[in-house]
Image: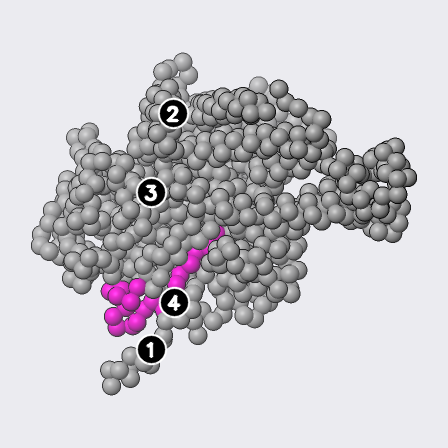
């Protein structure tokens, strides 16, 4: 197992390096320039666009050949220097360091919300198959899957913040992360981000549970006189959870790369999604490469963690 | 008695929260490195410039002790600053700081100041910087070798760096870029109504009341404890925040103005802006050859109804444009411009006649006649613009419809901004080793052919000659290929000793606006108006084109 993990970690570093190199080259050879967004502002001031472009590129070393820029960047990276964000005017790591917590708390709470409610409802739905509860859960989960998160967020703001005044219309960073006020203001974003996943988990859990409920070992367990609680919790759910773990881990990767960003936009949460999005539009190469690299490592780690978790859930699984 | 008078004035209370959407956030507080307008705006809360202007374009001194003196020959500018300006360490801000900022930072080769063009002049074919010189502690001079009457407006915007800090970083661009003092504005002393407190990117910029502000000695200004700029991901949520009372002020989109005007506790002010929209006609070799004829350009502009655009698309929050000089500018002259696109010069029948007079024929094709090019083929123009804006989309479709009315088919192409810049606006002489630029001379063409582009621009109402970048033959953004000696001569004349007399300058601007409106290298569509929504307990606002000029006097009541 240990050698498997070490091997996977080495692969991860190679994959991350390859992605970093590809991202770096694509950004540099692409048709965009950090100056693009300023052109009309520069023109309104009666300036020569080309001379401003040259000035900016010279200041940030973007006028050097790409290969030279690449080796400078890699050299700095090996020394732990991730570069300077010219769109945020601070070191890249400082920028990421001051924003990651906002994404992390949102993703963590939304994932817990979706797993606890989604898996719980899915289990009950399967056990109470073809009852009113099952029909209601199925109906609501279809709605949950269909509603775009962006729209749901706007509607929640309109109803609960504008009309009812229960919440603020936006996320307020004045509240400490570990405070009840912060927890309260995360309720709407967590619902927005977690609803789609929650609905999905209800469907997947119900389906996986029903598959296992029909298996012979369940009949055997019941015939042995085991209490229903044990049959469902220990025998059925334990076997149903394996495919669920794959789906949950996959969803976690999608949230990190997409879902959380839209929720951050709607509620004004200054997380990494917003940082990377704005960096892309500003052609802030150093930030784009850094967040791509972090995202890559995160997904590689999630994959590795999933594989390791399998061995715990199903002792028959062995890695050589 | 003095105490009683002091108590009678407004007291500083509450936090003013301004909403802004994500794209409008500043990039740096180290202003000399900035290329975006927002960065200068953010720094302005803590660091006043030499002067600003009010809604009637009257100059309002800030750090200036008196207005800038210009020598009769227009070559020497003497600037006298106030003697009560202090840096954060308590030392006096002197003319030496200003001259140092100019000579050692803005004019240096190591720092690459973006807007150095403002401070250069062409002498014997060479670009040289103006010459700054200290006169005494509070006065300095700038000497030019050539006359540029609008140079004074550049001077009004000047802010200094503290020499005692900047010398530590001089010559090292990385160290200067990353200097904590400059990125946290910790040097600004009593130079602005607020002091920097916090900046969390993509979230908020916070400045706190500066009790030592040099303009607050008598008035007690500013009157907010904190001024906060809160960033929103979408304008819909930002406006919901205004409606819910979570923020104090934000811009309101035209379609929401009626709704906000019905809310008692919100005041909506409609004000002119510097923004306008234009349709550029490609007069280069890869555009339709008809666009190289003035009569054809006039006919096309005559067919596009500007009133409809102003009323139906902008819902009345725009006015027809005829020139790069807005009607709010002191240099605008209504009499001379050709008002194409507005009755009586919004006339499709007349436009058709003009096209026929220019040598083009029509062919019957079902219900509508079709314009034919010189080879007898139906004229089909491509309109290139960027996606993502309902207004631009509606305008593009309206232009398509209007030109269809004179027998011209228009194909709308939506391309992203970088693509528009590189494939359509940048050009080079085919087969040459030129680097693509936005104007590589009359023979240059863009990578992709195009006929019309639709874009938004900004102008400077006080110094509109900056628009020479678009309309002069050597203009750096003359991507549509308009070359006219008379226009070049007038731009040159305005920026010479002939323009020193304001009356003469206004006549020259009138003539220039007339010439450009007749030549129609572009069709000026509309000047937009902005709607600003405030909670109604904010007092002291003077609505107008520069309504924030007195923001330090705003207060809650």
Q: Which mark identifies residue B9?
A: 1
Helix, strand or loop status at disc 1 = loop
- Cα gap from disc 1 to disc 2, whole angstroms: 60 Å
Q: Secondary structure at mark 2?
A: helix
Task: Please report the residue visible at 59 percent of the width from the left and 29 percent of the height from the top.
Answer: A304
What is the spatial separation of the Cα atoms under label 2 and label 3, in whole angstroms?
Answer: 27 Å
Nearer mark to the viewer, of 4 and 1: 4
Q: CA distance from mark 4 to mark 2?
A: 47 Å
Residues at marks 3 and 1, CA–CA distance in whole angstroms:
38 Å
- Residue contact between numbered discs 2 and 3, judged by CB atoms under 8 Å: no
- Residue found at the far left of this picture: B136
Q: Which residue is mark 4?
A: B224
Chain to which mark 3 belongs: B
Image quadrant where residue B179 sits: top left
Q: Quadrant of the C terminus of chain B?
A: bottom left
The boundaries of the magenta stretch are B210-231
């Amino acid at each position: 197992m240990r050698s498997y993990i070490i091997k996977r970690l080495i692969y991860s570093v190679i994959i991350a390096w390859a992605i970093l190199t590809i991202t770096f080259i694509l950004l540099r050879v692409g048709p965009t320039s950090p100056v693009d967004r300023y052109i009309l502002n520069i023109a309104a001031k009666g300036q020569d666009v080309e001379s401003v472009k040259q000035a900016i590129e010279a200041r940030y070393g973007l006028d050097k050949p790409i290969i030279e820029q690449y080796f400078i960047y890699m050299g700095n990276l090996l020394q732990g220097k991730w570069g300077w964000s010219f769109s945020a005017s601070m070191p890249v790591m400082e920028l990421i360091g001051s924003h990651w917590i906002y994404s992390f708390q949102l993703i963590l709470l939304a994932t817990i919300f979706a797993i606890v409610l989604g898996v719980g409802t899915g289990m009950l739905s399967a056990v109470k198959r073809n009852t009113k509860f099952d029909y209601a859960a199925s109906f609501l989960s279809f709605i949950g899957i269909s509603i775009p998160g962006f729209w749901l967020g706007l509607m929640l703001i309109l109803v609960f913040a504008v009309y009812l005044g229960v919440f603020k219309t936006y996320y307020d960073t004045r509240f400490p992360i570990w405070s009840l006020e912060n927890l309260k203001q995360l309720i709407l974003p967590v619902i927005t981000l977690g609803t789609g996943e929650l609905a999905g988990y209800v469907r997947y859990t119900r389906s996986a549970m029903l598959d296992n409920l029909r298996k012979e070992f369940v009949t055997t367990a019941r015939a042995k006189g085991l209490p229903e609680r044990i049959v469902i919790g220990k025998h059925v759910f334990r076997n149903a959870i394996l495919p669920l773990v794959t789906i949950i881990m996959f969803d976690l990767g999608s949230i990190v790369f997409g879902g959380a960003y839209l929720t951050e936009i709607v509620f004004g949460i200054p997380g990494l999604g917003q940082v990377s999005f704005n960096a892309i539009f500003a052609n802030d190469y150093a930030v784009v490469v850094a967040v791509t690299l972090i995202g890559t490592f995160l997904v590689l780690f999630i994959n590795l963690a999933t594989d390791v978790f399998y061995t715990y859930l199903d002792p028959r699984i062995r890695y050589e | 008695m003095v105490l009683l008078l002091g108590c009678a004035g407004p007291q500083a209370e509450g936090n003013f929260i301004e909403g802004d959407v994500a794209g409008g956030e500043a990039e740096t507080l180290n202003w000399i490195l900035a290329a975006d307008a927002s960065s200068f705006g953010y720094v302005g809360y803590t660091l006043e410039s030499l002067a600003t202007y009010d809604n009637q374009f009257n100059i309002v001194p800030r750090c200036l002790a008196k207005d800038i003196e210009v020598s009769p020959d227009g070559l020497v500018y003497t600037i006298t600053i106030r003697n009560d300006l202090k840096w954060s360490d308590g030392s006096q801000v002197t003319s030496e700081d200003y001259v140092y900022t100019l000579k050692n930072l803005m004019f240096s080769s190591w720092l690459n100041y973006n807007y150095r063009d403002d401070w250069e002049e062409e002498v014997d074919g060479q670009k040289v910087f103006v010459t700054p010189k200290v006169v005494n502690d509070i006065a300095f001079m700038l000497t030019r070798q050539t006359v540029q009457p609008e140079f004074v407006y550049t001077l009004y915007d000047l802010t200094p760096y503290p020499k005692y800090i900047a010398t530590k970083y001089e010559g090292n661009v990385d160290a200067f870029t990353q200097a904590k003092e400059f990125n946290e504005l910790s040097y600004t002393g009593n130079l602005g109504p607020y002091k920097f407190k916090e900046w969390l990117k993509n979230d908020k910029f916070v400045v706190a009341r500066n009790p030592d502000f040099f303009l607050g000695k008598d008035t007690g200004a500013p009157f907010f404890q904190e001024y906060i700029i809160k960033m929103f991901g979408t304008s819909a949520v930002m406006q919901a925040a205004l409606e819910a009372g979570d923020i104090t002020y934000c811009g309101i989109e035209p379609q929401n103005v009626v709704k906000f005007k019905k809310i008692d506790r919100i005041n909506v002010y409609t004000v002119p802006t510097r923004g306008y929209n234009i349709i550029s006609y490609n007069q280069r070799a890869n555009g339709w050859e008809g666009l190289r004829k003035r009569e054809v350009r006039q006919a096309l502009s005559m067919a596009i109804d500007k009133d409809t655009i102003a009323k139906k698309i902008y819902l009345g929050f725009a006015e027809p444009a005829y020139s790069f000089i807005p009607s709010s500018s002191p240099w605008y002259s209504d009499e001379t411009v050709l008002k194409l696109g507005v009755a009586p010069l919004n006339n499709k029948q007349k436009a058709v006649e003009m096209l026929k007079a220019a040598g083009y024929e029509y062919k019957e094709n079902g219900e509508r006649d079709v314009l034919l090019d010189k080879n007898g083929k139906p004229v089909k123009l491509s309109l290139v613009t960027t996606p993502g804006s309902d207004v631009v989309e509606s305008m593009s479709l309206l232009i398509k419809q209007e030109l269809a009315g004179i027998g011209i088919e228009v194909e709308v192409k939506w391309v992203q901004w970088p693509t528009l810049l590189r494939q359509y606006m940048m050009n080079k002489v085919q087969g040459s080793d030129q680097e693509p630029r936005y104007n590589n001379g009359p023979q240059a063409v863009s990578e992709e052919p195009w006929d019309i582009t639709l874009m938004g621009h900004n102008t400077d109402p006080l110094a509109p000659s900056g628009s020479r970048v678009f309309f002069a033959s050597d203009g750096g953004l003359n991507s549509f290929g308009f070359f006219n000696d008379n226009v070049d001569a007038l731009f040159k004349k305005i920026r010479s000793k002939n323009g020193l007399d304001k009356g003469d300058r206004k006549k020259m601007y009138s003539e220039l606006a007339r010439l450009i409106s007749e030549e129609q290298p572009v069709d000026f569509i509309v000047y937009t108006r902005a709607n600003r929504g405030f909670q109604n307990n904010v007092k002291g606002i003077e609505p107008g084109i520069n309504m924030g000029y007195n923001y330090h006097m705003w207060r809650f009541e």
